[in-house]
Image: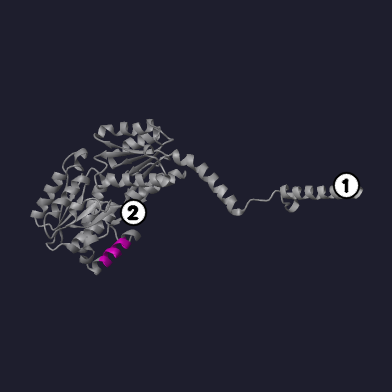
Amino acid sequence: MRISKSWTLVALLVILMLMAACVAPAPTTGGEQAAPAAGAEAAATAEEGEEAAAPAEAAIKIGLVTDVGRVNDRSFNQSAWTGVQNAAAALGLGEDDYKYIETQDAKDYADNIGQFIDAGYNVIVTVGFALGEATITAAKDNPDVYFIGVDQFQAEAIPNLVGLIFHEDHAGFLAGALAAHLTKSGTIAAVLGTDLVPPVVAFKEGYEAGARYINPDIKIISTYHPGELSQAFVDPEWGAATAKQAIDQGADVIFGAGGQTGNGALQETATHEGLYCIGVDTDQWETVPAAHPCLVSSATKEITPGVEDLIAKAAQGVYESGNYYGGAGLAPFHDFEDKIPQEVKDELAAIDAGLKDGSISTGYGQ
């Protein structure tokens, strides 16, 4: 009996030990809890980082105010709005977090900016030289809002305002040099917005200087829009008529630099076989398909990437102020690529390098 009970006790002890082994945690060195795998820790950290970053991104709300004219002007305003759209997409913003207002009358500049401020937008892009004064006033009155003024030179640095500006004279110089190489008649023309806007003057003077750099004896017909600032960039009929007048005077290359007004000049030139035209601000091959028959290139300002970059920096807490220079140059030749001799392309590249390093001067502002 005693032997039977002893074996029973032994058997029970063995069973209990086996059960304990199954449920007890595996021991770790020093008796501490085992650390999670490096990959799991990194994933957890990444998730925490994403959760922490999300509110900062959602807090960015971007408003854009155009100068007088439409946001889809296929040139200046559209380039800035595309920059806003690209930045918003990169930040993962919703549709309610970025919007635009098209200014119908210059007296509404301040009110349009104010609409975004009242609605809680904290990054406001104002597009055009004419909005400069209203933008400065709004920036001083609202130090917690960040302003990006496209084509607005800042004489005084304000911490929450940056002027996105460009060397338009450089882009114009390259366009003029190209025009001088292309002309067969020895006469070229420029159809321009108003001379009340310094960037337009810079394009014009650069264009003329670049053409004379190639041919000092070239004839240049440059015409500014005669109307008020509110009319100068939204008058394609005048642009077309002015281009036609220049063509009648022998011009065979037309530079259209004036928003929708310039677009009218490009489209008119396209109806005349064998002539060339040059666009402005953006690569207008992408925006004015009606000009394809003549559109050899465009004198560009990198407005889209400039706006996009400044918004991205602001989202990271980096606020540029004063003046921020965006790139300027010539757009691709597209269908005219094979019609431009390699020696001309090489010379344009050399001119571009000279403009950038200062060995070639446009003479603008001197």
Say which of 245 and 291 sits in front: 291
Prevalent SS, magenta region: helix
Q: Residue at x 25, y 59 (%)?
A: 174
Disc 2 is placed on an element classified as loop
**Residue 366 seen by the camera:** no
Which three-letter amino acid code belongs to the residue tagged 1? Lys
Looking at the image, is 191 positioned above or below residue 344? above
Classify residue 75 as left or right of residue 118: left
Q: In terms of image quadrants, where is residue 115?
A: top left
Which three-letter amino acid code belongs to the residue tagged 2? Gly
Is residue 352 highlighted in magenta? yes
Instruction: Tell me the colour scheme of the image.
Output: one colour
Report which residue position mark 1 lands on.
Answer: 5
**Residue 79 seen by the camera:** yes
Magenta segment = 345-354
Inter-mark Cα distance, 2 to 1: 96 Å
Residue 191: x and y in percent read 17, 50
Disc 1 is placed on an element classified as helix
Q: Nearer the viewer, mark 2 or mark 1?
A: 1
Classify residue 163 as left or right of residue 235: right
Residue 91: x and y in percent read 42, 45
Report which residue position mark 2 lands on.
Answer: 327
- Residue contact between numbered discs 2 and 1, judged by CB atoms under 8 Å: no
User: For the residue carrying disc 1, how many other residues have a C-alpha within 10 Å: few (<14), some (14-19), or many (20+)?
Assistant: few
Residue 107: x and y in percent read 26, 32
